[in-house]
Image (tube, helix red, strand yellow):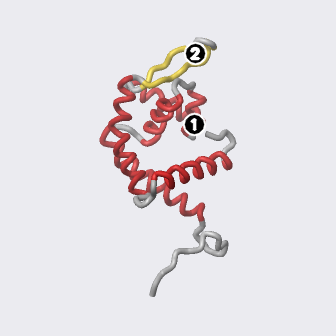
Amino acid sequence: MVEHAPNPSDDSRPLGLAYLVGRLDHVLGKRLRDCCAPAGVTVPQYTALSVFRAQGALSNAQLATRTMVSPQSANEMVKQMEAKGWIERSPDPSHGRIIQIQLTPAGHAILGQCDGKVRAVELRMFPDMTPEQRTQLYVSLRSAVRALSLEGI
């Protein structure tokens, strides 16, 4: 007996797209924990460090928004990463009460230790995708996040 893939437009199926995205999030989180842990990096820390690399200096509030954690959790994470020398804090030159956080050379180095492993996990998810298909998936997922997010990314 040949099993057929479910029709994505069939609304009667019990396991829809939201379920699959949730399962992917769960499995992906485990794989990322496994590949970052040997470097002493948690997945939220890797995410935060990646955001700093992409965005440059950010405030704690901006980091919390972009990493989807509470400001309190972001503050604790910043303290841990600062103690490890991965980031540094300095006063914002245009607003004395805002503290800007940015990567240090050690932060760039720790990202380098994890990037290849994270990339391997990403490639393993969709081994038969072309670069163009990966780009389209990225655009679609980013659009979905923006559509469901209050803040966007």
Task: Look at the image and tell me in which quarter the C terminus lies.
Answer: top right
Residue 51 screen position, x and y as percent: 50, 34
Residue 61 screen position, x and y as percent: 60, 29
Instruction: Look at the picture and state if 15 lies above or below 43.
Output: below
Residue 94 screen position, x and y as percent: 62, 13
Q: How many marks?
A: 2
- Asked where in the image residue 8 lies, by quadrant, the reply is bottom right
Instruction: Look at the picture and state if 83 lies above or below 45.
Output: above
Q: SS at mark 1?
A: helix
Residue type at mark 2 is: Asp
Q: SS at mark 2?
A: strand
The mark nearer the N terminus, 2 or 1, is: 1
Circle number at residue 66? 1
**Image side of residue 50 versus residue 152, left or right:** left
Residue 88 screen position, x and y as percent: 45, 20
- Asked where in the image residue 83 lies, by quadrant, the reply is top left
Instruction: Look at the picture and state if 106 lies above or below 10.
Output: above
Task: Look at the image and tell me in which quarter the N terminus lies.
Answer: bottom left
Residue at the extreme left: 38
Residue that appears at 57% across and 15% down: 92
Circle number at residue 92? 2
Alpha carbon distance from label 2 to label 1: 19 Å
Residue closer to the observer: 121 or 48: 121
- Asked where in the image residue 60 lies, by quadrant, the reply is top right
Residue type at mark 1 is: Arg
Residue closer to the observer: 107 or 44: 107
Residue that appears at 55% across and 52% down: 136
Decide: marks 2, 1 in contact (CB < 8 A)?
Answer: no
Q: Residues within 10 Å of mark 1 (few under 14, many from 20)?
A: some
